[in-house]
C-alpha cells in the first residue's frame, strides 16, 4: 500500500495518533551514520597517502589506477553477494559480518609495499565495505516510513563526507607521529569496535525493547511491510531494478574519482602537499554533507507538501544534476579555491542526487528485494567505477590532465536522471506478490 493510500484511509483521529514520535529510529540512523563515516575513512586513507607512498615505493599512475580498478571490481561482487545475504539473513548479521571483514582488511594494509600487494590486502576491505549500503538501506526500510526515508538516507549517507573530511586531517598527524602503518591499524580497530556495538544494539522495531509504543505504531503504520526474499528471476524483470542499476552505473564513478584522485589533483594542478590537503577537502566534504542532507530534505519536504514521490524525488535529482555541470571547469580554474568551490558544488550535487536515488529501492520494491536490488546497483556502480579508474589512469599517464575526467563527471547526473525517468516514468510501488 502506498503512502498516499494510507493517508487517505486514515481518519483524522488516527492520523493525529500516528504523528511522528519517538527517537529510537534516529538512534539507528546515527549508528548507520557512524558506520559510513568509518567506511569512508578506511577506504580513503590510501588516497591521502598516495603521493607519499608513490614517492617512497616508486608507484606508477597506471599501477595506482589498478588498485582503484580491482578494489571496485571486488566491491561490486561483494555488493551483489551482501545484497542477497541481507535479504536472507537480515541486516543485523550482514552488517556485523561486513564490518568485521573490512576491519581485518584495513589492518592488513601494514603488510603491503607495492601496488600489487595493496591490491591484494584491499580485497577483504572491498568485500566488507560492500555490505554497508545494502545493510543500511534495509535498516532504513525497516525503521522509516516513505515520508522520512530520503532524509534518513541523506543523514546516514552524510557520513561519507564526514569520513572524507576526517581522513586528510588525521592521517598526516598519524603518519608524522607514528608512521604510515598506524593510520591503517587505528582506523581498522575503530571499525571492529563499531561491529561489536552494532551486533549488541541493533534489532528490528518490534524486537526492540527500548522503543515506545507510539513510535512502534507510527513505524508499523507507514513503513514498508515485511516480505519474503524475492527470487532473482522476478527481480530482474522489474524496470525499477534497472533504473536503479543504471543510475548507480552513471554516477558512482564520479564519486569514486573524487575519492581516489582529489589529493593527487591538488598536488598535480596546484602544488599542494600532504599537509595542505586538509582545508580544501574539508570545504568540499562539508558542502557535500549539506548536499546529502539537503537533497533528502528537499524531496521529503516536497512529498510532505503534497507532491507525489515521483515528482518529489525527480525534482530534487534535477536540481542536483544541474549543480554538477560547472565541475567541468575545475581543471581550468585560475586558482585553488575556485577549483575547490566547483568540486564542492559537484560533491554536494552528487550526495543530494544519491540520497534520492538510494531511496528508489525502498520506495518501489518489496522489503524482501531491497538488499538484492541494492546489491545489483552496487555492482553496476562498481563496474562504472572500474571503467572510470582505467580511463583516469590512462588519461593521466598519457595526457597528464584532469580535463577529460572532469568533463565526464559534469554530465553524468543529467544523463542518469534521464535514464531513471525513462525506466520509471510513473514511479509506482511494486506489490510484494
Image (spheres, grey):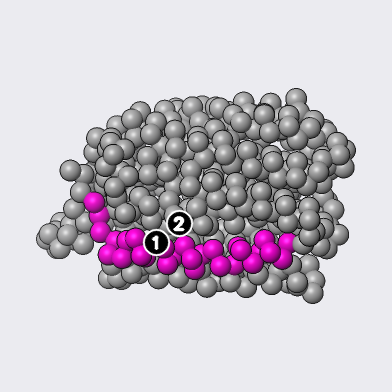
Total labels drawn: 2
Question: Given contact means CB atoms under 8 Å apart, are the residues at marks 1 and 2 in contact?
Answer: yes
Q: Quadrant of residue 46?
A: top right
Label 2, secondary structure: give it: helix
Q: Is residue 425 magenta?
A: yes
Q: Is residue 97 visible?
A: yes
Residue that badge 1 annotates: 420
Q: Is residue 180 above or below residue 345?
A: above
Considering only vertical position in the picture, is 334 above or below 372? below
Pinpoint residue 70: horizontal percent, then vertical percent. 63, 38
Residue at the (44%, 65%) spot, across then down: 417
Question: 400 and 222: which one is in front?
Answer: 400
Left or right, 295 with respect to 271, comes to: left
**Left of 49 or right of it: where is 419?**
left
Q: Disc 1 or 2, which lies upstream in sequence?
A: 2
Mark 1–mark 2 distance (CA, rounded to whole Å) = 6 Å
Which is more toward the observer, 20 or 376? 376
Q: Is residue 200 left or right of residue 338?
A: left
Q: Which residues are magenta?
A: 402-430
Q: Residue at x 79, y 38 (%)?
A: 174
> Taking 77 as reference, is 140 above or below it?
below
Residue 18 in percent (x, y) is at 22, 54
Q: Position of residue 373 (x, y in %)?
A: 37, 44
Q: Is residue 25 above or below residue 179?
A: below
Residue 405 forms part of the magenta stretch: yes
107 or 433, nearer to the observer:
433
Residue 203 appears in the figure: no
Name the element at disc 1.
helix
Find disc 2 in the rendering and name its residue: 247
Helix, strand or loop for the magenta stretch, by majority: helix
Amino acid at each position: 500500500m502506498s503512502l498516499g493510500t494510507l493517508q487517505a484511509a486514515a481518519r483524522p483521529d488516527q492520523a493525529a495518533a500516528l504523528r511522528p514520535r519517538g527517537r529510537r529510529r534516529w538512534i539507528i540512523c546515527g549508528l548507520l551514520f557512524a558506520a559510513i563515516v568509518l567506511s569512508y575513512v578506511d577506504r580513503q586513507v590510501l588516497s591521502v597517502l598516495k603521493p607519499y607512498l608513490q614517492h617512497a615505493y616508486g608507484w606508477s599512475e597506471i599501477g595506482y589506477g589498478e588498485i582503484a580498478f580491482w578494489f571496485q571490481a571486488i566491491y561490486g561482487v561483494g555488493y551483489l553477494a551482501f545484497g542477497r545475504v541481507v535479504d536472507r539473513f537480515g541486516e543485523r548479521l550482514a552488517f556485523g559480518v561486513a564490518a568485521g571483514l573490512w576491519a581485518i582488511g584495513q589492518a592488513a594494509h601494514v603488510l603491503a609495499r607495492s601496488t600489487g600487494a595493496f591490491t591484494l590486502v584491499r580485497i577483504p576491505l572491498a568485500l566488507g565495505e560492500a555490505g554497508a549500503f545494502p545493510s543500511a538501506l534495509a535498516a532504513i526500510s525497516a525503521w522509516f516510513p516513505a515520508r522520512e526515508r530520503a532524509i534518513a538516507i541523506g543523514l546516514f549517507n552524510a557520513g561519507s563526507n564526514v569520513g572524507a573530511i576526517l581522513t586528510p586531517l588525521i592521517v598526516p598527524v598519524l603518519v608524522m607521529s607514528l608512521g604510515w602503518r598506524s593510520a591503517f591499524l587505528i582506523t581498522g580497530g575503530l571499525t571492529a569496535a563499531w561491529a561489536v556495538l552494532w551486533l549488541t544494539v541493533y534489532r528490528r522495531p518490534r524486537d526492540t525493547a527500548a522503543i515506545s509504543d507510539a513510535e512502534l505504531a507510527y513505524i508499523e503504520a507507514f513503513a514498508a511491510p515485511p516480505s519474503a526474499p524475492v527470487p532473482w528471476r522476478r527481480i530482474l524483470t522489474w524496470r525499477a531494478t534497472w533504473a536503479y542499476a543504471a543510475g548507480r552505473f552513471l554516477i558512482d564513478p564520479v564519486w569514486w574519482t573524487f575519492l581516489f584522485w582529489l589529493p593527487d589533483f591538488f598536488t598535480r594542478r596546484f602544488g599542494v602537499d600532504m599537509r595542505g590537503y586538509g582545508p580544501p577537502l574539508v570545504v568540499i566534504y562539508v558542502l557535500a554533507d549539506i548536499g546529502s542532507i539537503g537533497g533528502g530534505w528537499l524531496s521529503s519536504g516536497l512529498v510532505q507538501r503534497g507532491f507525489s514521490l515521483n515528482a518529489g524525488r525527480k525534482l530534487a535529482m534535477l536540481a542536483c544534476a544541474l549543480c554538477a555541470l560547472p565541475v567541468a571547469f575545475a581543471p581550468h580554474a585560475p586558482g585553488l579555491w575556485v577549483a575547490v568551490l566547483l568540486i564542492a558544488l559537484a560533491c554536494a550535487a552528487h550526495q543530494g542526487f544519491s540520497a534520492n536515488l538510494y531511496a528508489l529501492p525502498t520506495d518501489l520494491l518489496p522489503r524482501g528485494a531491497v538488499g538484492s536490488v541494492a546489491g545489483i546497483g552496487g555492482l553496476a556502480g562498481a563496474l562504472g567505477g572500474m571503467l572510470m579508474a582505467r580511463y583516469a589512469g590512462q588519461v593521466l599517464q598519457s595526457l597528464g590532465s584532469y580535463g577529460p575526467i572532469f568533463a565526464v563527471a559534469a554530465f553524468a547526473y543529467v544523463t542518469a536522471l534521464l535514464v531513471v525517468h525513462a525506466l520509471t516514468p510513473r514511479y509506482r510501488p511494486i506489490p510484494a506478490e
